[in-house]
Image (cartoon, grey):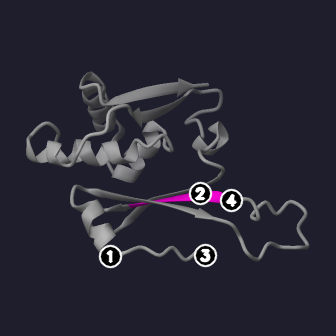
Amino acid sequence: MIPIKVDKDEIRQGIELGMYTKEYKHVNPYPDPQDPDDASVNEHTIYVYIDENYNVTGVKSFYGESPSLDDLEASQEGGEVRVPIVVKEVPAMAVQLGMLSQEEFKVLKICDGMNTVEQVAEIAQKPMDEIESMMENLREKGLVKVIKRT
């Protein structure tokens, strides 16, 4: 268990439009001296995703700055991994101006390069076909690019 300090106002502001994401970097101050394979002394990154109902809908933990392909987990053996990334930042006001739906903005916040398309659906708690459609709309708007890896 890792204690992560988060300001309540920070969470409130983050979930106003559907999703709060917290990045936390951590090094284990008490590694296991008996375990030669204990890598917890190396810095690792934790991402926590909290929805508008204050439910934790996703947690990722990996060593380094970004997850490896193994961390991203291909949906099938030998399959390809599709990682959506935001290519153009969008202010929250875009929702108020009707340029994006609240759900599209929420999904954009999850497209941080740390999740596959399948993981975005899981964290957003949406069916895959809905996420696929949303990804296509966001791609057409020039906001998201889906990188394919094998």
- Real-space Cα separation, disc 3 to disc 4, in angstroms: 15 Å
User: In front: 11, or 72?
Assistant: 11
Name which of mark 3 and mark 1 comes first in the sequence: 3
Amino acid at the residue labelled 3: Met
Amino acid at the residue labelled 4: Glu
Q: Quadrant of the N terminus?
A: bottom right
Name which of mark 1 and mark 2 comes first in the sequence: 1
Circle 2/circle 4 CB separation < 8 Å: yes
The residue segment tinted magenta is 43-49
Q: Which residue is mark 2?
A: 45
Circle 2/circle 3 CB separation < 8 Å: no
Residue at 35% over, 67% down:
55
Query: Exactly how many numbered labels are in the figure?
Result: 4
Q: Which residue is mark 3?
A: 1
Q: Quadrant of the C terminus?
A: top right
- Horizontal side, residue 48 vs residue 12: left or right: right
Q: Which residue is mark 1?
A: 8
- Real-space Cα separation, disc 1 to disc 2, in angstroms: 21 Å
